[in-house]
Amino acid sequence: MTSSQRPRAVLTGVFFAFAFGLGLFAGAIPTLMRQTGLDTAGLGLALTLHSAAYVGAMTVGGWVLRRVEVRRLMRGVLVLHALTFVALFAAGTPLALTACLVALGLTAGTVDLAMNTDGTALEREAGRPVLIRMHAAASGAFAIGAISGSALASLFGSLACAVLAVLSIAPVVWALTRIPPRVTAAPASRSSDEAAVAPSRAHLGLPVVLLGVVLGVCIAAEITAQMWSAQFLAQQGGPNPALAGAGAALFAGCQAVVRSLGDTLRRRFDDHRVITVSLVLAALGFVAVALADGFTSSVLGFALVGVGTACVVPCCFALVARQAPQRSADALGVASLVAGVLRLPTPLCLGFVAATWSDSVAFGGIAGLLAAGVVLAVWIKKTQV
């Protein structure tokens, strides 16, 4: 393995371990709800607070990354991330579970921003698309984690998931110590020519904000499939309680397959076109879930959502980073803050709508949100943002 390939391999491992732990949690949600006595509305509130912490961490992360080297930050926060999983799976009350989800949001949001910042930098250095393959590893890991979390939690208890989460994170923390830190140019006073060429914050504002909205729409849809599918399928009375994580697993598995081809799609088609078509497929997937009348049809609907959402987030991250190559962490932080406006209320709204009307109505609302995202993506392309 060459010196240029090693950092990409290690970062891909970070993506894998990061998503594997979240998948374990997603699959174990029904067990954790029974273990802590958390109801559907409480889950919506807990996931909303988790999202708030996640978005806040990603927003502040740009400031932190200007002061702490990105790989050093990943190492330290991943250790805290592993410890948070132990506390999460050991939670015994609704309050404890909610507090752990807030802590998980802080660590996950920081790691998310750091690994995507490093990933976009590696993509620029490689001179070709490589980021989506890292996201493919994350999707595959989430799929494995979701079905494993569902089975392990129902058969052996949720603490078995904590053991797996720690075992997946420990090797990548060690691997991060084996690659050199990312070298960034020291801040210095720019010449007048450099200042003229460098894009201003005002110029970057509109593209980053609009892409942040599209990003938020997709992430809201992903959160719904990841965190709501297990309890939805459990309520439908599937063939086996241990298969409650099948929706999240198949969703993420389809994401992984499509993302493995994503870099090829990005080379053949532009990012804007990939985003638009993907959002259409995701909207159709949620329509299918909303209209589903059984376990199998619901799982297939979540699979289509996975196909549709696969490339949107990586493409948005790449487009945002392209707006400011020398300060991609700042640009990604701003886009994440905008995305948080849509992402943050999603779990709370889902819990309210599901409790007041039905899960099907809630999923239909997500389909409508994705349709609005399609319209915005088409408008962005036409205005060449």
Image (cartoon, rainbow, N blue to C red):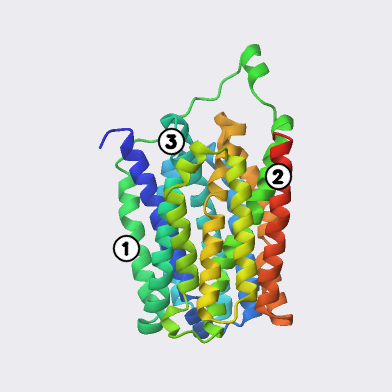
Looking at the picture, how far across and down is residue 244, in whole percent? 47, 78
Depth check, front residue: 216 or 10? 216
SS label for mark 2: helix
Q: Which residue is under mark 3? A: 122
Circles 1, 3 touching at the beta carbon (< 8 Å): no
Of the numbered discs in the image, which one, if any, rests on residue 11?
none
Of the numbered discs in the image, which one, if any, rests on residue 378?
2
Which residue sits at x=63%, y=66%? Answer: 49
- Assess disc 2: are there few (<14), some (14-19) or many (≥20) residues with their C-alpha within 10 Å of its C-alpha: some
Looking at the picture, how far across and down is residue 237, in whole percent? 52, 87
Please indicate whether residue 220 sits to the left or right of residue 28 in the image: right
- Residue type indicated by callout 2: Val
Residue sitting farthest toward the left: 1
SS label for mark 1: helix
Of the two numbered discs 1 and 2 in the rendering, the one whose residue sits closer to the viewer: 2
Please indicate whether residue 8 sits to the left or right of residue 276 in the image: left
Looking at the picture, how far across and down is residue 30, in whole percent? 51, 80
Figure label count: 3
- Assess disc 1: are there few (<14), some (14-19) or many (≥20) residues with their C-alpha within 10 Å of its C-alpha: some
Q: Look at the picture and state if 164 lies above or below 109.
A: below
- Assess disc 3: are there few (<14), some (14-19) or many (≥20) residues with their C-alpha within 10 Å of its C-alpha: many
- Residue type indicated by callout 1: Leu
Q: Quadrant of residue 19?
A: bottom left
* Real-space Cα separation, disc 1 to disc 3, in angstroms: 26 Å
Which one is earlier in the sequence, the residue at label 1 or at label 3? 3
Q: Which residue is under mark 1? A: 167
Q: In the rendered image, is residue 339 in sight?
A: yes
Q: In the rendered image, is residue 80 in sight?
A: no
* Real-space Cα separation, disc 1 to disc 2, in angstroms: 43 Å
- Residue type indicated by callout 3: Leu
